[in-house]
Image (spheres, rainbow, N blue to C red):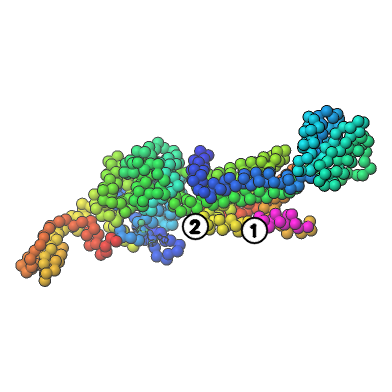
Amino acid sequence: MISVKNLSHIYSNNDKLAINDISFEITKGETFGFLGPSGAGKSTTQGILTGLLKLQKGNVHVAGYNMNKVDNKRFNKIGVSFEQSNVYSKLTAKENLEFYRKLFDVPTREPEELIKLVGLEGKENDRAGSFSKGMKHRLTFARSMINNPELWFLDEPTTGLDPTIAATIKEIINGQKAKGVTTFLTTHNMYIADELCDRVAFIIDGQIKLIDTPKNLKLLYGKKLVDIEFIDNNEVKKETLKLIDDNDKKRMYEIINKYKIQTMHSKEATLEEIFIQVTGRGLI
Amino acid sequence: MIKKMFIIFGRDFLSSRRDAMAVYIMVVPLIMAVLVAAFAPGLNDTTVNIAMLESDSAEHIEYIEQYAKVEVFKNIEELERRVNKRDEIAGIIPLGDGHEILLQGNEADIIEMYAVLLNSFYELGLTKEETTATMISFGRTIPPLKAKLTNMLISVTVMLSGMLIAISIVEEKNDDTINAVNVTPISQIGFILGKSLLGSSVAMISIIGAIFITGFYNVNWIMIVIIGFCSMILSLVIGFLQGINSDDFMEAAAGVKMLMLPIAGSIAGYELLSDKWQWTMYWSPFYWAYKANDLILAKIADWPTILLCTGLVIISSTVVFILFIPKIRKGLS
Ligand SMILES: Nc1ncnc2c1ncn2[C@@H]1O[C@H](COP(=O)(O)OP(=O)(O)OP(=O)(O)O)[C@@H](O)[C@H]1O
Ligand SMILES: [Mg+2]
């Protein structure tokens, strides 16, 4: 569905490469997570794949189209949700979607149905300008599904949403996945990525550090961990130790013998922890 | 593509209806036309009013009507009442073999003279053809001030329609919606043309409406539409550029103020410069558009002149358009 070879991109007002020679493939029906800290180049990559940014260097094929010579008809099978919500403030939620659906040549979904789906029921006839940030974001997200896309680009679909609504959005993405939609999901939310993605790519400073399934990553990097909370000098301290690491094991005995233990949990490494291990950097 | 252009148009119209400034721009030319229609005739209507009686001979009334505005009354009482009203009107009524001139008393001398002379000519059976003077007509049959005001109104209308486009581009920029439209099957050219529809239809409707309201029904409509359409293209281009280069309405409005300069300059140049210096305005498309409209409204336009003006407007518009199309495209992506 998507094939990217040796893609690089540089912004004219920036002398640093925003994307530095990345390559990857996404197969049909796959949910592909693009994970990385702020400024890593995630949105830039989505911009190039959707054609909003001009391809400068590299070979990119999207939904059977070579991105060197673009044809707008391809958008009939593509849906794009933006990092920054972008809806017409002067139009109501419904008018926004009604307008948008008419721009497609393929069967489209009912605006009311989509508005309901993202939990904006009752707001159909309110102007989008009166919406909160999160509501606008949901409307932008809903709009991206209006043409029943086969290929779906989601840039931070859950950022800035409260957990319940984020869970709803996650369910919607899951539902689309079940229908065989290919999804390019950009996020720094590792839990979402973990639950939704067939494969994830770690991107940092415009370079892909690795691509693998979340399961494999956990097998490879996610050795069993133990979180220990203990009291040292009337102070609660917390340490995370790897069960297979000899030094960590010694440290654990030490803690158990020397201090009063408050809590102790064993757990699997999260994708976030693996990310830190692999890239040496946090996600924010 | 045509269908999608109209979808863009429909949306722009919906948004504009909810924008006070855009609504203002859409209605203001028509209001101004009403004002011109209401006040301009009074300003320069030099026709003399004559009151006559129904019982007078049809031949007499017809003769006077050629040279004055005649109001016909049933009886002498009504006629006297009319003459006694504040404005300037003289009554001519039959009396025996001849006629009597009725005056309120405060009319200008010229009115009195005109009524007396006109009646004498009738009684003497004189016609225009019998004069020994040679007639030289400059061809103007419309009160010039009214035509000038209408023409200026057209120039302003055309400029405002560009402003309408600028407003709607600024809206797309503020809401960041151009990106959303750019990931639909509509082509960029389709989008640009669709976005032009609101400004152009408002311009054409306002021009035609203004000409109707001001009463120039029998001008050459084809000429008006052609020259209106061409000057509109220029204002569309300017509207796009302003929209793209401004981040908010105030900035776009400031851009329009700048545009007033060449427009006002061209009009002033055309009206005030002597023939010897007219060439200094030849660079300006607004000059050619104004000149063409001036000739059309005065009903002395001929096709070669109009086509020349149209051609020059198109050439300058196209030059501006070609120079800036990369910028427009870039600004919209
Ligand atoms: N319009 C722009 N002009 C110049 N530089 C830009 C522009 N957009 C992004 N960049 C730069 O390109 C790099 C990648 O940015 P990008 O927006 O792709 O990051 P991101 O991974 O999406 O980050 P975030 O998680 O904050 O959305 C950054 O260094 C950023 O400063
Ligand atoms: Mg981003």
Q: Quadrant of ligand 2?
A: bottom left
- The residue that label 1 is drawn on is B261
Q: Is residue A80 left or right of residue B72?
A: left
Q: Is residue B23 left or right of residue B47?
A: left
Q: How many marks?
A: 2
Magenta region, mostly helix, strand or loop? Answer: helix
> Do the residues under discs 1 and 2 have CB atoms within 8 angstroms?
no
Whole-percent x, y for residue B310 in the image? 69, 47
Residue at 80% over, 30% down: B75
Q: Name the residue: 53% across, 54% down.
A: B243
Q: Answer yes or no: are tags 1 and 2 on the same subunit.
A: yes
The 10 Å Cα crowd at callout 1, few under 14, some 14 to 19, many 20 or more, is few
Among the two numbered marks 1 and 2 on one chain, the one whose residue lies closer to the N terminus: 2
Is residue A108 something one can see in this rendering? yes
In reply to whether residue A36 is colored magenta, the answer given is no
Name the subunit of mark 1: B
Q: CA–CA distance between discs 1 and 2?
A: 22 Å
Quadrant assignment for the C terminus of chain A: bottom left
Residue drawn at point x = 37 percent, y = 46 percent: A139
Tag 2: amino acid: Asp
The stretch of residues the image draws in magenta is B262-274
